Image: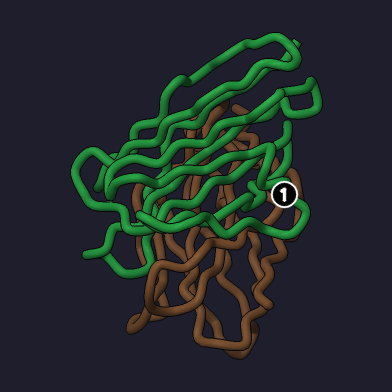
Chain colours: A green, B brown
Amino acid sequence: GAVVSQHPSRVICKSGTSVKIECRSLDFQATTMFWYRQFPKQSLMLMATSNEGSKATYEQGVEKDKFLINHASLTLSTLTVTSAHPEDSSFYICSGADRSNTGELFFGEGSRLTVL
Amino acid sequence: AQSVTQLGSHVSVSEGALVLLRCNYSSSVPPYLFWYVQYPNQGLQLLLKYTTGATLVKGINGFEAEFKKSETSFHLTKPSAHMSDAAEYFCAVTNSGGYNKLIFGAGTRLAVHP
């Protein structure tokens, strides 16, 4: 299947700093990418949907100024957690939709963010 | 709006026993349905999916699921559990066609004991 690479897999930062997480589709073009957040022992909650070259669409309750999403190319989307606080600590997972494969998403390995 | 309900947050079976993980969905349009598996600190791996056609779908690692429209269900089964099947399993639904967001169930943690 198609591969989505997410980096970094783990990041620890101090409160107040910003962290960028990258999500790359390695062998397909991802017109659309989705960012999910997962709290410990819970399900994945969709944060936002990003389409290449346009602004991301955020789910209700997700602060767009805190979670900046950029989808500048068909193979790269980034999530920047700005002014991170301990409550932002979570597991973040991206997924890309393969334009040639209707309906299936391919997931990155996830990034565990810990804010001290 | 679409939603997914997974009955049982924890399921425990003996090695070699039948695995049954339950999933019910709600959708106003024909759904695409998925089962994913997640191992600790990892992303999601697709087990199987239903889009159209045959309602009994077979996936990897011996898993299968049956789409029952009348029951709005998509339960996941495996005839004989293996220790390596211990993981978190998520059922998900999306609109048919296009590249739509997946809505996930709460997940079921499967434990397999000797």
| Residue drawn at 63 percent across, 39 percent down | A67
From the viewer's perspective, tell me whether residue B63 is left or right of residue B39. Answer: left
**Vertical order, B30 against B19 (above or below):** below
Image quarter of residue B25: bottom right
Residue nearer the viewer, B60 or A26: A26
From the viewer's perspective, tell me whether residue B45 is left or right of residue B113. Answer: left
Kindly tell me whether residue A24 is visible in this rendering.
yes
Image quarter of residue A75: top left
Q: Chain of mark 1?
A: A
Image quarter of residue B12: top right
The percent position of residue B52, horizontal first and vertical second, equals 36, 81
| Residue drawn at 72 percent across, 35 percent down | A39
The percent position of residue A113, horizontal first and vertical second, equals 62, 21
| Residue drawn at 60 percent across, 62 percent down | B103
The percent position of residue A70, horizontal first and vertical second, equals 46, 43
**Vertical order, A29 against A88 (above or below):** below
Residue type indicated by callout 1: Val
From the viewer's perspective, tell me whether residue B37 is left or right of residue A90. Answer: left
The residue tagged 1 is: A62
Quarter placement of the C terminus of chain A: top right
Residue nearer the viewer, B25 or B70: B25
| Residue drawn at 62 percent across, 52 percent down | A46
**Vertical order, B27 against B92 (above or below):** below
**Vertical order, A17 against B59 (above or below):** above
From the viewer's perspective, tell me whether residue B39 is left or right of residue A115. Answer: left
The percent position of residue A74, horizontal first and vertical second, equals 28, 50
Residue nearer the viewer, A113 or B20: A113
